[in-house]
């Protein structure tokens, strides 16, 4: 009867799709892989519900994505053969499963401690992160953001929030990425690669994409460190290279281009590459933007431009507006989004561009060109990106 009660419980949770997370612990017998804990979470793979089993085996985390029926069978098997304790968390309740050494099963029903996104009562709601607190993530541990138990270290909490915000933005563009072949992504100016590792982990380990990711940076010591870490984590599809954005020509087709905090016109060089690769998605967080600061002239804006700090901020915003409009002219739908809260960094605008399935018709493109030219001429600007893409902007833009 006890086994039947457990089987009925797991069957209901999987059939109704109400399981939010399961955590299995207290190893019953020695496991050949040395796995001491397994977590189970629902994930969407190619628009279909699956359950991701994460097995924590020493320094490694092994992932297995299963359809609901197979996931139910595996969970029951693990509780029957390998683990003596399970916490099954659903929207309506938590179910604590305790199995004695003699095989006696006890199930305790407790008030829910997790809620599906959007379903938590106000007094019981906590932030739902894509990479969850309390669940160890190998690359976050290696980068010193989490400890081995999955606790986010206090000095690194802002970075943890930033990483999750970035992963959320990637989750939003999943419908625009090809799923029937290997996905190619280039991260220009990857630096220490916190977000590069997050992107790879989310797309490969959590979403099941077949992908290769190239991180490019000018700093040799940084690239050596990132390469060693990728090898340690077993991220076979992730590699790091020393190189300049403008000179990089190893690939002929790229699906997504990421450029985070590339300085001044280096951001424009990356955007030009993305356009010429016909990339499906562009994610760009610009850094310092000096080009327009040196160019902008306007008697009307004199009271603003006479103050250096205001001129700097205005120039940065105007530069991003120019970039967004030029991307629209060559066939992208663009959004300028807040990356993370202003209190955490002043460089908080992300340009998200998705290649449109229906480029602007001639009338729409002419209107976009007119708006852009009026804005550019008012500022007396000569933007790098316009010059770089001149062949793709003709005949819509007049020099």
Image: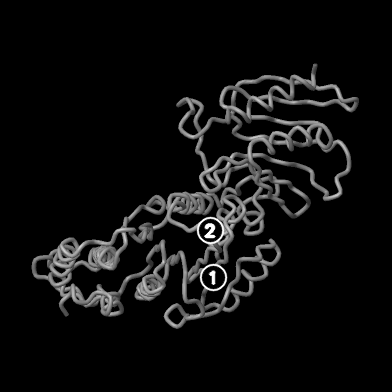
The residue most toward the front is: 180
Q: Label 2, secondary structure: give it.
A: loop
Q: Label 1, secondary structure: give it.
A: strand
Label 1, on which residue? 215
Q: Is residue 326 left or right of residue 89?
A: left
Q: Earlier in the sequence, mark 1 or mark 2?
A: 2
Q: Residue at x 32, y 71 (%)?
A: 289
Q: Residues within 10 Å of mark 1 (few under 14, many from 20)?
A: many
Q: Tell me the quarter of the image containing the C terminus.
A: bottom left
Can you tell which quarter of the image residue 348 is in?
bottom left
The residue most toward the bottom is: 247
| Disc number for residue 138 | none
Q: Residue at x 77, y 50 (%)?
A: 57
Label 2, on which residue? 180
User: Looking at the image, which is closer to me, 139 or 304?
Assistant: 139
What percent of the width, then of the height, locates residue 385?
Answer: 30, 75
């Amino acid at each position: 009867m006890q086994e039947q009660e457990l089987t009925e419980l797991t069957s209901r949770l999987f059939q109704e799709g109400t399981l939010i997370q399961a955590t299995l612990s207290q190893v019953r017998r020695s496991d050949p892989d040395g796995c001491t804990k397994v977590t189970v979470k629902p994930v969407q793979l190619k628009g279909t519900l699956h359950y991701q089993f994460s097995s924590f085996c020493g320094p490694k985390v092994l992932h297995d994505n299963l359809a609901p029926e197979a996931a139910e069978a595996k969970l029951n098997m693990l509780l029957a053969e390998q683990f003596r304790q399970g916490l099954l968390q659903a929207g309506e309740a938590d179910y604590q499963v305790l199995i004695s050494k003699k095989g006696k099963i006890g199930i305790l029903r407790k008030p829910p401690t997790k809620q599906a996104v959007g379903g938590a009562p106000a007094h019981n709601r906590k932030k739902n992160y894509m990479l969850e607190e309390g669940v160890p993530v190998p690359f976050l541990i290696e980068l010193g953001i989490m400890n081995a138990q999955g606790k986010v270290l206090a000095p690194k909490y802002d970075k943890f929030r930033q990483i999750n915000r970035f992963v959320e933005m990637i989750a939003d563009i999943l419908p625009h990425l090809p799923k029937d072949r290997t996905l190619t992504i280039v991260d220009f100016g990857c630096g220490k690669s916190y977000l590069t590792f997050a992107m790879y982990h989310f797309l490969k380990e959590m979403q099941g994409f077949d992908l290769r990711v190239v991180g490019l940076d000018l700093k040799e010591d940084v690239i050596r460190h990132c390469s060693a870490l990728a090898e340690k984590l077993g991220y076979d599809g992730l590699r790091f290279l020393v190189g300049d954005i403008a000179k990089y020509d190893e690939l002929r087709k790229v699906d997504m281009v990421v450029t985070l905090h590339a300085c001044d016109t280096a951001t424009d060089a990356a955007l030009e590459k993305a356009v010429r690769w016909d990339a499906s998605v562009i994610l760009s967080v610009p850094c310092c933007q000096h080009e327009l600061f040196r160019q902008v002239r306007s008697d009307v804006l004199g009271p603003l431009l006479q103050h250096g700090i205001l001129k700097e901020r205005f120039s940065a915003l105007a530069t991003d507006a120019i970039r967004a409009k030029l991307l629209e002219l060559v066939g992208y739908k663009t959004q300028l989004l807040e990356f993370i809260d202003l209190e955490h960094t002043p460089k908080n605008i992300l340009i998200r561009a998705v290649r449109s399935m229906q480029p602007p018709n001639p009338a729409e493109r002419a209107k976009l060109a007119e708006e852009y030219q009026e804005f550019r001429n008012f500022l007396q600007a000569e933007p790098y990106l316009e010059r770089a893409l001149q062949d793709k902007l003709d005949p819509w833009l007049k020099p």
